[in-house]
Amino acid sequence: MRMHYNRFAGQSLERVAALSDGIFAVAMTLLVLNLTIPVLHERLTEQPLWASNVINSEGALLSALTPLLLHLLTYFMSFLTLGMFWVGQQTQLSHFTRSDRTLTWLHLLFLLTITLMPFSTALLAEFITYRVALIIYWLNLLLPGLALLGSIRYAWGAQLVKEEATSAVRAALERRIVVAQILYAIAVLLSIFNTYISIAIIVLLQLSSAIAGRFSPLNRL
């Protein structure tokens, strides 16, 4: 009897989880590269050493650190984002009995979007008042959410889930993704008024999900 490769390829959930852990760890680490230490002094041919770009006092150092606040904000937001997606993926994998080739590739597609997070974060940090940069960042929230949603629906349809993974569990997993993505979209729409409003709402949604426990609207879904 002839055996087709696709029937037994990519069945290890452990390998998917291990690859995911590594990629998330690298992506989270790369985020910090946007935080650069101010230069002690910078000699320019047309400016003397005592010019305003020289850090030679406590006040000058504080002034040089001020622009980093926006980078810290986007770093914090993206670290929360990656943490949420890591938890979401691990929650899914814990309800699966095994994987198959299609499910593995769905999670590889999910991980592809995760590797883009350092880029979208750096872009937003540099152009935080630009709606285009915010929309690109939002797409980096939307695409992994869609990948996880597709993973849920495929796994249940292909009967790759455990017996205790009931239809209620599936509904809870899907509802959390859909509601979160709707809230993110609403937050981005508010960038019509100001991008900082959008970013503040996104951070509050993430904090609510991560630390607010049973008081979080997302955790009651």
Image (cartoon, rainbow, N blue to C red):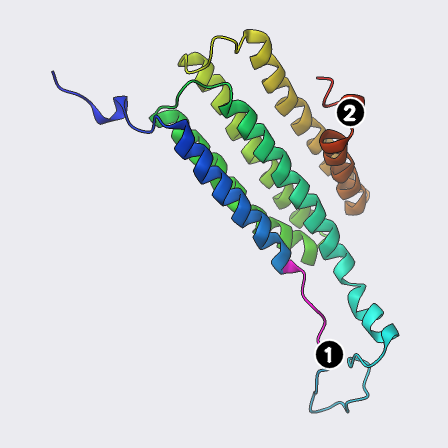
Which residue is painted at 77% across and 46% down in the image? 195
Which residue is painted at 81% across and 86% down in the image? 51
Secondary structure at badge 1 equals loop
Specify start and end residues of the magenta stretch as a single range. 34-40
Quadrant housing residue 30 = bottom right
Q: Disc 2 marks which residue?
A: 216
Q: Which mark is residue 40?
A: 1
Which residue is painted at 65% across and 39% down in the image? 81
- Amino acid type, residue under disc 1 in the picture: Leu
Q: Which of the image's four quarters has the C terminus?
A: top right
Dots 1, 2 in contact, CB < 8 A:
no
Q: Nearer the viewer, residue 209 or 195?
A: 209
Question: Label 1, label 2: how many angstroms apart (C-alpha)?
Answer: 44 Å
Q: Which of the image's four quarters has the N terminus?
A: top left
* Percent of width and height locating residue 8: 27, 24
Which residue is painted at 72% across and 91% down in the image? 46
Q: Is residue 122 left or right of residue 13?
A: right
Vertical comparison of 187 with 49: above or below: above
